[in-house]
Image (tube, helix red, strand yellow):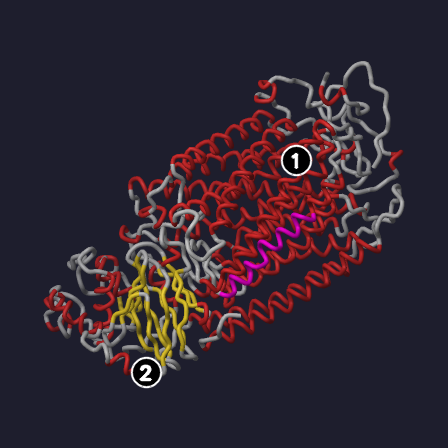
Amino acid sequence: MPEQASTIAQQVDALFYYWLGITLFFTVLIVAAIILFVVKYRRRAPGEIPRPIFGSMKLETIWIVIPFLIAMSLFVWGAKVYFAQYRIPKDALDIYVVGKQWMWKMQHPTGQREINELHVPMGRKIRLTMTTEDVIHSFYIPDFRVKMDVVPGRYTQMWFEATKPGRYHLFCAEYCGMNHSRMTGTVIVMRPDEYQAWLSGNTSQLSPAQQGEQLFQTLGCTTCHLNGGRDAGGRGPQLAGIFGKPVQLEGGQTVVADENYLRESILNPSAKIVAGYSAIMPTYQGQVSEEQLLQLIAYIKSLSPQSGNAAMTSANAAQAASSPNGQRR
Amino acid sequence: MSTAVIPVEAKPRTTYLNAGQTLKSWLLTLDHKRIGILYLISVTFFFLVGGIYATLIRLELLTPQGDLVSAQTYNKLFTQHGITMVFFFLIPSIPAVFGNFLLPIMIGAKDVAFPRLNLLSWYVFMTGALFASYAMFAGGVDTGWTFYPPYSTNYANTYVIATGLGIFIAGFSSILTGLNFIVTIHTMRAPGMTWFRLPLFVWAQYATSLIQILGTPVLAITLLLVALERTVGIGIFDPRLGGDPVLFQHLFWFYSHPAVYIMVLPSMGVVSEIIATFSRKPIFGYKFVAFSSLAIAIVGFLVWGHHLFTSSQSVYAGMLFSLLSYAVAIPSAIKVFNWTATLYRGSISYDAPMLYALGFIGLFLIGGLTGLFLAALGLDVHVHDTYFVVAHFHYIMVGGALLAYLGAMHYWWPKMTGRLYPEGWARFAALVVFVGFNLTFFPQFILGYLGMPRRYYTYAPEFQLLHVLSTAGASILAVGFILPAIYLLWSLKKGPIAPADPWLATGLEWRTSSPPPPENFERTPIVTWNAYEFRPQEEAEVIGGGKPDASSLTGE
């Protein structure tokens, strides 16, 4: 058994033991029955023909209904654990992750950057917002029993709460090319005071939101996105306070301004036009890196009173990316 | 099983084997039995190729660091292993070999409905194989057999299109075979051969054919899109062009999950035949077993999303796919229970085919139950893309499909070749395969739960012991495969002459001589009995081409 080093690990293992028990029970039951029959009813004379037995409705019903009910118990339990794994908590520490062939790049909310190492405090919920510069990767920490694919062109999120200080394997679980097996790293879980000390030992950087603010200036976003929006004479919508809020679009649809919406609005601005504005914003595709995008989004989030308050499950993320409104493309 | 001493007849009996001796008579044959043999030789060759890849993979994984081959070569090895085994061995194996050979005989027909189409399907298959082999010799492909973009479309610098084209082409042979079987089963059954008198192997083939016809075109379209994305960048999967890489995963698994049932349903059909024959009992709950094949074929189309639980698919979609995956497990469970019940109060013999069939039940049981670990959403998140998955599908593919293939090979060997194989060696080999298989793949379940990701060229040192066990098992398994290759080939020349019905079995294939005459039967059989109605041997009438003798095998 791997180490149980997160709050979710015990839940996953409990489910595992439950089904392991059932698997053993049925395997022993069937194998014992087969061995018993094969020995007891072995052929004793070359020409013997046993009396045929064609079936039994009663038995068929029993071995359809009982396995079905047992399977449903596993389904319900499995779904429950899944929701715990993928329902992103609200009060979490935001860490941004960018995967590329063949390394993991992380940035802490206070600006510290790491490659293939992730320092996290114990006993605190950590939310990872992840994307990749190239192919699909998958962020996997076996000792935490968590895994989430990292998909180009969108943000995926996962969370965990580490329960034991220590060093844990970080693996890329989705095949990503030549050095896939070397796209590994270490998650270092520290006691909160140690984590604070580690953070303060690396304080030279700006936070992602601060870097985003600088980018916001240098990319010229401020020319159009004024505080107050159209009413204040801005050609683009106001960004303060929009994160996590529904946005009314041209054509009547509404979309929640989550990470994926903001990302799309920067890279492909004409995909979803806010009601009352026109499609004049140029694309920033190719001008901002994945990391800069995350910083811009962190900045927009920081403008929002709801910052850190938007529980975005991967369901929402997927919905936003695949656009149920049909507005996109 | 005894061989009667029969005086050599003056005129050699015509069988499908001696009806024409030239290479041309084989390459242009319209006889379903000869086409089955052509497939047998082709897919066994690809099994050998895939096995060589597997051997190299297991050798590389003996040590945590990369030492035997380079990282790039290792990635090509597991990719080629998967592609060769899935598309050029497992999918055509039982349907195209034993389905072709047996299905018309089992229903009392002279041939399949479209013999020319049948021959064409073999040529199409070989053309596809040619492209895939060209790609392999030119440098191979390193995307994994799953071809996930954007790696396969924008990053891989290997022969993706040539390989994809090979699979694309081979897919049409699968469609043609499926089409042929469905029409044959509907229209060519002998008088009295009603649907519920069909052997369960035929039901399984019918269900398989439905999947081949309905699923394979989707794979063809998907591979075509990958090729278009690679060449002209149509942007369907590339997010920079507004595409969605996860869309590919939906399309790919829409075929590739049902394809698992293309591989395992015919195996279940084989096991039903063998269990009935070697316990001399009708299959318990015939209709339940027959309809469970159809249920698997239909529900199998609705579960593809269980490969995407960690792919950023909506959690609600995940729930639905999990639920449906449990639904598809039930018909499989029905089969296992009914096979076990068939043994009750039977007259069970321990011939090699039966050993394979019993081994199949045990390994399929473990493969199936571990599949339910993977269908449980919260558990799958941890074990997805680890060796747990690798172990699970090898229990289904090798423990299931391959054991059934070997079982079928032994069971129908006397019918196909007219010779008996050496029983003692065959039982020994079956045991070696069983032991070797479990030693190879059981440790991989543990590796997976410990967190060892799949497709890793190097790995953390704590995983080494289990990898060494696995490699040791693989070398035993290899012996288990080499043994039958030797004694089966030996038996072609030296094996005792097989009677028409060496097992005292019931199917129509045992009512004709071994090997059968070109037209299968001398006159159209009229079926007045149900499947698996066992009768004393003297009552069984042989309506094939006369008595077996040595000259009829070689035509000398």
Q: Which mark is in front, 2 or 1?
A: 1
Q: Chain of mark 2?
A: A
**Image quadrant assignment for residue A22:** bottom right
Image coordinates for residue A274, horizontal then vertical, percent: 22, 64
**Image quadrant assignment for residue A297:** bottom left
Q: Which residue is mark 1?
A: B486
Image coordinates for residue B103, horizontal then vertical, percent: 67, 35
Q: Where the C terminus of chain B falls, by quadrant?
A: top right
Q: Chain of mark 1?
A: B
Q: Which residues are magenta?
A: B431-450
At mark 1, the secondary structure is helix
Instruction: Kindly give the residue lying farthest to the top in the view shown.
Output: B10
Q: Which residue is mark 2?
A: A194
Measuring 58% from the left and 42% from the top, which residue is drawn there? B210
Q: Where the N terminus of chain B falls, by quadrant?
A: top right
Measuring 41% from the left and 53% from the top, which residue is drawn there? B66
Q: Examine the rendered structure and indicate whether residue B484 appears above or below residue A165.
A: above
Question: Do marks 2 and 1 both belong to one polypeptide chain?
Answer: no
- Residue B52 is left or right of residue B186, and the answer is left
Q: Is residue A308 magenta?
A: no
Query: Is the magenta region chiefly helix, strand or loop?
Result: helix
The amino acid sitting under disc 1 is Ile
Q: Examine the rendered structure and indicate whether residue A144 appears above or below residue B129.
A: below
Q: Nearer the viewer, residue B330 or B131?
A: B131
Would you call the spot at circle 2 few (<14 residues within 10 Å), some (14-19), or many (20 or more)?
some
Q: Examine the rendered structure and indicate whether residue B166 appears above or below residue A214.
A: above
- Residue B335 is left or right of residue B29, and the answer is right
